[in-house]
Amino acid sequence: MAKYVIGVDGGASKTECCVATLQGNIVGCGKAGSANPLVTSWQDATTQVRLAVIQGLETAGILPNQVISAHYGLGGINQESVINKWQQELFYLTPDAKLRVENDVFLPLYALTKNCQGVAVVSGSGGNIGLIDTAGNRIHVNGRVSYSSSQLGKSALNIVVREIQHKNLSSFSMKLLDLAGCSKEKEFIDQARVNALETQFKLAPLVSELAKLQEKTAISLVKQWLSVVKADLIKFLQAYKVKEMPVCFGGKTFASIEQLLRQQLEAALAKKAACWLEVETHPPVHSAVAAALSQIDGKG
C-alpha cells in the first residue's frame, strides 16, 4: 500500500490541507475555516482542522493509515500545553503517522532552508516572527508585532473613503475600485461600513498588485507598511542576538511584494545582523508538506 504525508496550514481566516506522495507530489487538498481558537473557539477551530484533513484524504482517495507523517502549522499556539491539546485532538485522524504540531510561523523555514534553522516572518490576518536556532529551540513572539496584512488594506480604504466623500477620486482609488469590482461608490462605502475588516482584507492584495504595476500611491503604502515590519524584525533580531542566519518571509503578501521587500529590508538585515533574506513564493501549505517530509528523513 502506497504511503503519503499531509501538511496543514491553519490560520485565523482559513485552514488548508495537502496530501502528498513521498516524492512531494500533491495528490489531494482540503479547505475549511479558521484554525485559530483565539479567533473562534476551541471547538470550532478543531472542527475546521479536522474537516480540512478529512476532505484532503477524500480528494486524494487514500485511507488514514496510509499517512506516515503529518505536520500541522496552526495559528494561536503559544505554549506547550496547547500543542499537547492539539495532538490529542488530531492523532486519530492519521493514527500511523509521525505527528508534529507547532505555530504556523515556522512553516517558511521548512521550504527555504536545508536544516530548518533561521528566522521566519509571516503576515496574514495577524503577524508573527519566530526563530529555530542551531540547537533546534523554537521561539516566537506569539503575534505580538505591530503589522498585519490587513493594514495595507486599511491604509488604502482610508484613502478611498476620504476621496469618495470629497468627490475627488485619484487614479489610485479608481484603479483599486476597478480591481475590487466595485462600480458604484455608494455600495463600496456601505460595504466598508458594515464590515470594515473584511473590506481591508479584500483590498490588501490589490494594493500589492498595484504596487507591482508601479502605481505610486500603492508603492508608498507598501513602503510605509514595510517600515513597520522592518522595525519589528530588527527588534526581534536584537532581542534574541540573531546573527548570520536566513530570514524567511512567508505568506502571499510578502510574496506579492518581493521586489520592494528586498529593496527595503535586504541591506538593513545584512548590516544589522549579517542575515540574508529568503521569500516563500508558494502557498504556506506546501511548506507544511515539506515539513511533513522532513520528519521522515529526520531533518525537521
Image: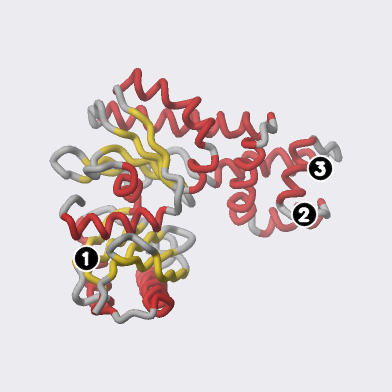
Q: Is residue 44 visible?
A: no
Q: Position of residue 137 (x, y in %)?
A: 17, 44
**Residue at (20%, 57%) from the top-left corner?**
80
The mark found on residue 182 in the picture is 2
Q: Amino acid at mark 2?
A: Cys
The mark found on residue 99 in the picture is 1
Q: Amino acid at mark 1?
A: Leu
Q: Amino acid at mark 3?
A: Gln
> Of tags 2 and 3, which is closer to the observer?
2
**Residue at (23%, 40%) from the top-left corner?**
117
Q: Name the image colouring.
A: secondary structure
Task: Say few, some or many: other residues with alpha carbon within 10 Å of mark 1 (under 14 / 14 to 19 / 20 or more).
Answer: some
- Whole-Å distance between the Cαs marked 1 and 3? 53 Å
Question: 204 above or below 87?
Answer: above
Q: Position of residue 26 (x, y in %)?
A: 39, 65
* Labels 2 and 3: the sequence-earlier one: 3
Identify the element where label 1 is drawn: strand
Disc 2, disc 3: CB below 8 Å? no
Task: Say few, some or many: other residues with alpha carbon within 10 Å of mark 3 (under 14 / 14 to 19 / 20 or more).
Answer: few
Q: Is residue 155 visible?
A: yes
